Image: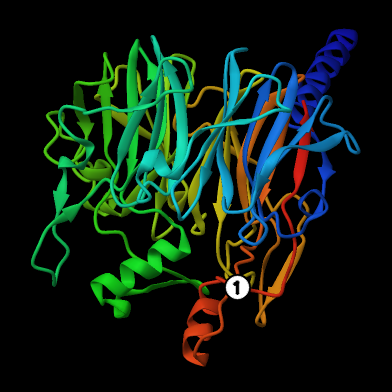
Amino acid sequence: MKRLIKSLLLIIFFILLLSHNSHAEILEKVIDMGFGNPRNDYAWSMTTYKDKLYVGTLNTYGGAQIWRSESGEQDSWHRVGPRFSRNLGVRCLYADGDRAIYACTSNNLGAQILRSENGEIWTSVVKKGFDNMRNSTIRCMMRYKDYLYAGCGCNGAKFYRSKNGFNWELVETNPSFESTQIKIPGTSKPIINNTMIGELAVFNNDLYAFTWTKDADPRSMLVSLRNLNIRENFRELGDFFLFPAPGAFEVWRSNDGINWEKVVGKNDLYGNGLGFSRHNPDNLNNDMVTSVTIFQGQLYLGTEHDFGKTSIWRTSEGTRWEKVLDFYELGEKFNYYVWRLMPFNGKLYVGTANLGSCKSSGVTGAQIWVSDSGAAGTFYNLVHNGLDGEKVNVMGIEIPKNYGIRSLANFRNMLFIGTATLLDYPVRKSSPSENMRRSRMNLGSSTKVGCEIWKMIP
């Protein structure tokens, strides 16, 4: 009997040991200080192509950069591609199988798409926002059937497609993504709700498009403020100031890329409402779908919420959605973005943007949450404290250095993590009050930090 009890205790010990070690992933920093340029503030995009890892940066001073590695290890990275002097950042890197890799940019003179078949020589296939300078950003790209689709916008959601990656055409969707109109209190005319297509996904043989009702580009926010003359409507979030969005996101789907059905949005047929507002009116503050993925046969989306009530939702058939994670309900009141969702090693990984000053309770910097099933109640916080707990000081305010997980990639059975750091933005000479307003919005700072790349070994 004693021998049996000892054996049982030994078995229990090993079970507990295995359970404890199941979350003991190894984290290692492989890139610091923005690849040697501290004004590379974001690792804005990341993908793999022909067994190499690519990262596109946000750099509002010298222009976007693309970096590549064959192993992901330290000292293995080198810069590829042309100079992007007028492109603020590579907002999307998309590998179209082994055909080509595409770099989609953000540019105030019109977004650009560059194409490469070897990662070294890049050809510009789209300039000046598809000849519409108001198309200032391209955030997503997806192959669906015979076409490659790109979602873009800023002042209105637009959709383009190409059969060969070189020649692109505007898709006259039915109905238009700009057909949803909303009215801002205090104004006389309704405005377009869907300012940009933020994410694309292929799910159950349909193409899904997820919209934004604002773009968190500081300049577009300032332009909106001037045009609407409602500066008094700034909302203070900790020590950050954000301009409130007019509406909430929508979700559309299509089986041909031309004819579309609204499954989440204003007057949708399924009772979801703008940003799931029919589930809860507070969801009208779900301005954007910032990330989507497919995990274990279900479609997931993550939101941005102006008041930190960021959430993750999923569906098995596209019209009936359930909320599986609400950060605010967990006491995490400063995760304003679900910035990345990605399956890895049989689990669903979630990267957040955690905003606020370090003096505020609950501000820990960029976080990574994980679930084995994606179901409600199964997510746990694997990484917080901005990965390494470092902080920076901005005008006397201390914030986490890595405040966001901006990009994720599965490369050689390791999870690579790209961070977002303090936005280093050129501030033109202006009146003291204008400079102070811009500084309070973190539009300019002498603090040069630079994004980081980390790898996680399971």
Q: Nearer the viewer, residue 270 or 117?
A: 117
Kindly tell me whether residue 25 is visible in this rendering: no
Residue drawn at (27%, 71%) of the image = 227
Residue drawn at (77%, 19%) of the image = 412
Residue drawn at (65%, 30%) of the image = 122
Residue 314: where, in percent of width, then height? 38, 28
Residue 94: where, in percent of width, then height? 56, 27
Tell me the SS state at disc 1.
loop
Residue 388: where, in percent of width, then height? 78, 53
Residue 180: where, in percent of width, then height? 16, 43
Q: Nearer the viewer, residue 136 or 54?
A: 136
Q: Amino acid at mark 1?
A: Gly
Q: In this image, 169 relative to 62: left or right?
A: left
Residue at the bottom extreme, as displayed: 432
Quarter of image, res 396: bottom right
Q: In this image, 100 relative to 4: left or right?
A: left
Quadrant location of the N terminus?
top right
Is the residue marked by circle 1 packed among few (<14), some (14-19), or many (20+) residues within 10 Å? some
Q: What residue sits right under mark 1 in the picture?
A: 444
Vertical relation: 339 (above or below) 456: below
Quarter of image, res 231: bottom left
